Image (cartoon, rainbow, N blue to C red):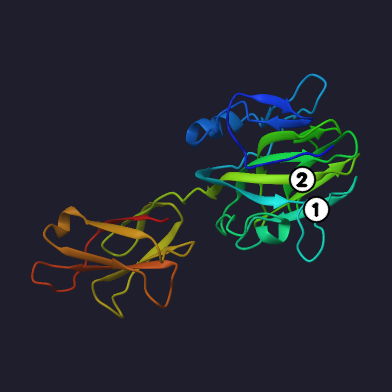
Amino acid sequence: MNRSIGTPTFGPIASEHGGVLMIKLSRPILTGAALVAALAGGTAWAAGSTSAGPRATPQDTTPTASNYVPMTPCRVVDTRGSFNGPIGPIQAGTTMTFDFGYRSAEEQGGEDSCYVPDNATAVQATITATEAEGPGSLTAFPWNTPEHATTVLSYDDSGNATSGTVLGLNSLNATIHALTSTVQVVIDIHGYYLPAPPPPLTAQVSTSGALVRSSGGVTSSGYQSSVHPGYYQVFVDHPVDNCTFQVTPGVTTTGYTVAAYVPDSNHQSVIVQLRDTISTNTQGYFSLTGVCP
């Protein structure tokens, strides 16, 4: 049977035309908090299936504490394509690993401009099984990690089977395992997940430079009197080059000015400088807040 898979269309219809099963997704794409809430139960939804035809079952690849970023749908994998030779199909009982990074899609039968950022942890994807040689199923899991036992998509040789799911990534790679029967696989992506930004770092520092209280990875602080009078240094357990800082002087330094910057000598620390009303470096207690991307 000759089957055709186009760019995914989102709507309520599933119909057959001339022996070709044309599948349109029966649910809208969820984004933001609604998507994360829906995925919390590890649910993948399927479209265009009938009681006798292909069906999908849940896969729990829900990313943890991530931010979802929608994107224009694009094709990142089509094993029917060719790049220095045929790509697929995925043979029965074997796996194939796909790269979702920059300029990798073309080598996988996809669109050259289809990729996600280097720090993406997962993608929201539509997986289609086509040209199957018989009944079978697919599992999908981050590359070089233990395989998920849950099936993401079941298929047979009666038509195309399509499922929407979250694919977890490891170094931008995901692995697909074809169980039982050989099959061609198409993957379209329409969003990705980024790691959640770290919590704000905070530090309350005494006049002597002692760390009174802290959060967000702040480990210690000190007064640099022997090197630079009026300079304090706050140490953090991660690089803070791209963080934005705000310093609030204590009540004993009312009217003083402050400055904060990351020194070239230690990118996991912040220098805080206090000056009095006549711009002389001085001591005083303060609170530091940093927001990092």
Q: Which residue is mark 1?
A: 96
| Image disc number at residue 255 | none
Residue 207: percent from the left, percent from the top? 26, 62
Crowd rating for badge 1 (residues with CA inside 10 Å; few <14, some 14–19, many 20+): some
Residue behind mark 2: 185
Residue at the far top in the pictured view: 51
Q: Which residue sits furthest bottom? A: 227
Q: Is residue 148 visible?
A: no
Crowd rating for badge 2 (residues with CA inside 10 Å; few <14, some 14–19, many 20+)? many
Q: Residue at x 47, y 51 (%)?
A: 198
**Disc 2 residue type?**
Val
Q: Residue at x 57, y 53 (%)?
A: 120
Find numbered disc 1 in the image and state the secondary structure of the residue it sits on: strand
Q: Residue at x 11, y 60 (%)?
A: 255
**Would residue 53 be found to the left or right of residue 116 on screen?**
right
State left or right for residue 193 relative to residue 75: left
Quadrant that contains the C terminus: bottom left
Q: Nearer the viewer, mark 2 or mark 1?
A: 2
First in sequence, mark 2 or 1: give its number: 1
Q: CA distance from mark 2 to mark 1?
A: 10 Å
Along the line of sight, the residue nearer the viewer: 243 or 172? 172
- Residue 97 as seen in the image, left or right of residue 221: right
Q: Are marks 2 and 1 in contact (CB under 8 Å)?
A: yes
Residue 73, located in which quarter of the rendered image?
top right
Mark 1 is on which residue type?
A: Met
Q: Residue at x 40, y 51 (%)?
A: 200
- Look at the picture and state if 122 lies above or below 48: below
Quarter residue 275 falls in: bottom left
Total marks shown come to: 2
Image: 281 above or below 78 = below
